[in-house]
Each structure stands twice: as structure tokens, then as C-alpha cells.
Image (cartoon, helix red, strand yellow):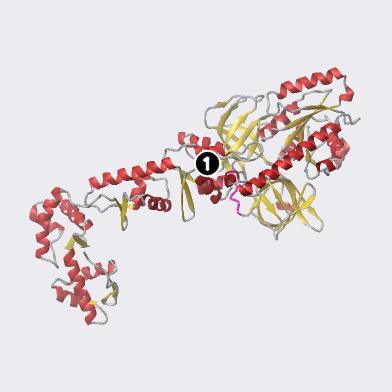
Amino acid sequence: MIIGTAGHVDHGKTALIHGLTGIATDRLKEERARGLTIEAGYAYPESPPAFAGATLGFIDVPGHERFIANMLSGAVGIQAMLLVVAADDGIMPQTVEHARILELLGVTRAWVALTKIDRVEPARVAQVTQELQRWLAGTVFADAPVFPLSNTSGEGVEALGQTLWTAAADVSRDNVSRDGAALSEPSAALAGAGRFRLAIDRVFVKRGAGVVVTGTVRSGRIASGDRVRLLPSGLTARVRGLRCQNRDTASASRGERCAINLSGADIETGRLARGNWVVAEASRVTDRHRLDVVLHALPESPTIKHWAPVHLHHGSAHVTGRVSLLEGETLASGASMLAQLVLESPLQAAHGDRIVVRDHGASQTLGGASVLDVAPPRRGARKPERLAWLRQLREYLPDAGGHQDSSAFWQRPMTDGTGIDLSALSDNLDRETSELERSATLAGWWVVAGQGSSHALPEMTQQMLYRKALDRLAQLHELEPAMRGVDIDRLRRMVAPQLPANLFRPLLERWKTDGEIVQHGPFLALASHEASLSPEEARRWQQVRPLLEASPYDPPRVRDIAQQFGWEEGEVRRLLRSCALLGGVYQLRQDHFFLTPHVAELAGVIRELDSEASPGAKAADFRDRVGCGRKLAVAILEFFDRIGFTRRIGDSHKVIREDMLFE
């Protein structure tokens, strides 16, 4: 368990950690000279025999308001708070701000050390204790116990230490229990830790080892020998060695503070700095200039206005930007709202990350943001369907312990027919798509995947799309009775235009198993549909057919038929194309239609000529055999080339599909 100090400057945080651990966390010469913490310090004591196996670490953050940025950097990874308040001063500005910052970062567990009790009367100790309890009652730390103590005499320090070690032992047992369950329970897919990410807060070179970076593991797991990427540079490196809580280790996981020894041809300390990230090589995290978030305003903050300039602290990084409110023009103190952070410099964020928001002058903490979407669209940020999606993404936010139960996310109904793009969601969450597919399947969703894409549809949405497909097919059959069916992509555009074409086909295969939808080549139709001409078309076809039969190898064209009957050319063309869809005729060239039996006869002629001459059928021989003009003979032979019955070789046409039927 990693415990972070919080509190006003000169209230005894560093001295208390020394009393609890025997370790001096002031490592800078200037800190020791001034008696003032400037950079975060760290202490990892050996566990007492009574708490063997428990891990307890302390992060000592600076309390002076001028070093609040350093405090925020050190606060990354803190799992519990040790709030330090001097009995003589009582609650001070940094007392409140530090506690609020840790609350914004998701910390919910705390203990209060009431220091310097040797300097005041017992009545003052009681008074400050009551003030603390009243103030904490309005925070998530309402149940935090208060330990009066003195760093000078040591009074009360041992009792606090015993309490902290007991809590650390409990956390260790819970982690072992949870990890064991994760190996055996199918529902563990709902609470995956994501890919490895670590926010760098220190970079240095160790003689004999090389470049070392330190930080707290934000998610996932890392092991010696793993390949990693460094952000924002994009350089790759290998993990040469690991230390957690000042001990060599083979691996580190979420919540642990560790030092990583990196090796790689391009790794130089000048290209690494506080605020950078170490991520798994497969991680999809990258630079982001816009982040959709849920923004929480502190009760003590002023009203936050739309497009307000702010300072943003993410991990150990610090950038500036603006707040774009998505559900109103102002955010009142203590309220929450969906918002978009527009950044002047990029952050490398993932869903669920916490961001601390401070005012334009960096003098006051306004609130905090939980990241919902790292790749928001540039337009339509306030559309109802977009806001609904962001509210659904809130269900995937981790709890205060960093753990997730995404069951509520998958239980939310969706009726817009879009489903969820699991490939995009995996990028946002920085998780494996396969993990999300398991989660969706366990929740009863349909998962369709193909060509690197994956989509999940709730059963209700899938049934809605299926009924819509049946309705559209029925409507098209009524409007176009001569059509054997509907082109697959045309049906997709009518039923599920948001679904990629490569995912509509596997969904279609599931629908076809019910037997109501059948496929004829590239066409889809209802099983009950029989293509036919309309009564009017059937009447006209009875008039046209004799004309085509009378001249089998040189039938009249569309314009000739139209002139003979006094019809519009467009009407004749539509009639013959409907007949072609039904298999009654073939369109050999523009506005030239042949009856199907005659096309079969022409194919027979080509077979005969091909068998008589090794090069194949020539245009002149074909013309003489069927008795048509040369131009028409060439057009007929080219038609058979186009459909793959023959292949042109020089001046001849060789049959390549003896088995092709013309019916």
C-alpha cells in the first residue's frame, strides 16, 4: 500500500515519515538546508516481523503552495492519504487543497496525524480534532481516524504506525485473494487491468546500469525483458531490470511504485523527462489534443465558465488548455458535467485517467476530470447521441481502488442500431479487443468480427436490425418484383449504414440460418419471394418476345421495338432488363438483348469452331456460321469474353469454361 502525505507547509510531514520509518525523505541539499520539501520524497521501510509479507510505502509531497505542481506529480499512484495537521495552526489552505486533490485523484482512504500536540494545551487538541471531523464529514474521508502525536517526543507515533501496517497487511491479503480469483473466475474479463502504463516522475543515470526512470504503474503489468514504448517520443526500449519499493523484482503491476532500467540504442536522458510515459509496446495511447471528460467542480471552487483557460495536471505532466462545457454554459461549485478539454500541448491519456484542473493563474484547484474518450469527433460534441455515449462510457470508469466492474456498461440498452465499435473502444480503453469481446459475449451481446474490425450488438438491437432487414426486403420485392433480390451492400446501407461492410456479412450469415433470408449469388431475398414481371410487364413481354424469336442472332434493338409499338424507349429498356434479371434474355451490348436459348445456341457455335481450329473461334468464321454482320459478330464474341466463357488469344477466342450453362 502506497500512502501519501498531505498538508500545509511546516506541519511536520517529513518529520513524521522519519519517525514512522527511520528514513529521511529530503534527498536534495537545498531541502535539508531550508528544512522545506521541494520535490516528492519516498520511503519504503522493512516490514516488522508481525506484518511479514505486507508492503508499505510513503510518498512525502511538498506542502508549500509554490510547489503545488511538484505535489501533484508526487501524488500520482497514492492509494491512501496521511493528512498531517499541526495542532497549533489547525486547518490551513494547503490542508484543504491537498486533501481535495487526492479526493479528485480517486483516493478514498485516509488517516489524520494531528502533530505538535506538545506545543498546545489538551483543549486545543480537542478543538482541532472536532474541526477536522466536521470538515472531513463533507469529503470522502469522513471516517478517517485522528491520531494526536508529537514528532519531537514520539508520543502517538507508534500507535499510528501499527494502524498503518495493519491496513497494509489487509491490502496485501485482499490483493492475493483477488489475483487468485482472477485466475479462476470467468467474470475476470470484466475487470482487466489494461495494458502497461507508467507516468515518469524521475529520470537519472545509474553507473553500471544506464538510464533509469521511476514512477507508479498506472495500469497493466511489466516484467524484465519486456519491450516498451516511450511517449511522446515514440522510442522503443527493453526493460533491463526492475525495482519495486527499493527491492529487485521480476515484475510490477498496477499501483506499485517502481524503477525501470531501460536499454536501447536511442535511449538518452535528454530525451526523457517528468511527464513522459512508459507504455507497453502494443499500447494504442498517443498524443491527444482533445479529451472528453466528466468534470467535477470542488465545493470550494468558483463557478467554472465555458471556454475558461485552465492548468491541467495529468500523471506527472502539466499543460494548459481550455474547458468546453457540453451540457451548459457554467458549472456550479460542487457540481459535475460532461466537458471537453482542449489542450494547448498534447497529453497521453487513456479512458479512466484522472486530471486535476486548476485556474488560469495556477493559484487554486477548481476540480478534477475523469477521461471518458480520448478521440472525440471534431464536430457534434453536444449532439444528444454523443452525450448519451459519453454517459455510457462513465459506466466503465474504475472505482477508487482502480478496479472495474463493467457490467453496468453492457446492461445499458441501445436502440439506435449502431451497437459498439469494439476496435475503437479498445483503443480508448487501451485494452485488447479480445478482452472486450469476452465481456460483451458474457453480457449476452452479439459480437461480429472481420478484417481487423469488431462490433458488438445487444440482442435487442440485433433483433431490431433483423426485423428491419425483413421489412426492407419485403418492400423492395413489392416495388421490384422482377428482381431476384437486393445487392448485399445496398441492403446494409438501408438497414445498418453505420456498420462497416466487412461486419455486415458475418451478421448476415447468422440471419440466414433462420431460413427467412436466402442468397442468390450477390443478391439477398426473402425465401418466399419468386421474381416475376408485373401484369403490365408480362402483357408487353408477350408482344416483344415474338420479335426476338423471329431474328434469333440479330434481334431488333430497343429503339426498333419502341418504334414498332409506339412505346417510350425507356419503358422498353426497363422491360428487357427486368426480363434479364429473370433469366429470359441476355444483354449482349448496349440496347441489344438476346433470348437466353439463342445465347446458348451461339455458345454452341463457338464450341464447334473452337473444336475445329486449335487457335479457337475467329470473328469471320463465326459471322459466316451465324449469318450476321461483322460488327455484331465481334460484339457477341466480346460478350462471351467478358463473362469468362472464352478468352481472346490474338484474333481468336478460346473456350475456357466448357461447363458454363446458359439457361
Identify which residue is drawn at 53% across, 39% down.
Answer: 409
- Side of 462 relative to 252 (left or right): left
Of residues 573 and 465, the one drawn nearer to the viewer in this rendering: 465
Q: Quadrant of the C terminus?
A: bottom left
The residue that label 1 is drawn on is 376
Disc 1: CA contacts within 10 A as few (<14), some (14-19) or many (>=20): some
Query: Of helix, strand and loop, which mostly describes the magenta segment?
Result: loop
In the rendered view, tell whether residue 62 sits above or below residue 509: above
In the rendered view, tell whether residue 114 sits above or below residue 240: above
Residue 359 image point, x, y percent:
66, 31
Q: Which residues are magenta?
A: 282-288
Identify which residue is drawn at 27% across, 45% down.
Answer: 474
Of residues 347 and 374, the one drawn nearer to the viewer in this rendering: 374
Identify which residue is drawn at 28% across, 67% down.
Answer: 642
In the rendered view, tell whether residue 630 sits above or below residue 98: below
Residue 650's quadrant in the figure?
bottom left
Q: Is residue 269 magenta?
A: no
- Side of 301 relative to 603 (left or right): right
Kindly tell me whether residue 648 is visible in this rendering: yes
Mark 1 secondary-structure assignment: loop
Identify which residue is drawn at 56% across, 49% down.
Answer: 435
Q: Residue type at mark 1?
A: Pro
Of residues 5 and 571, the one drawn nearer to the viewer in this rendering: 5
Kindly tell me whether residue 43 is visible in this rendering: no
Residue 77 image point, x, y percent:
71, 41
Q: Is residue 286 magenta?
A: yes
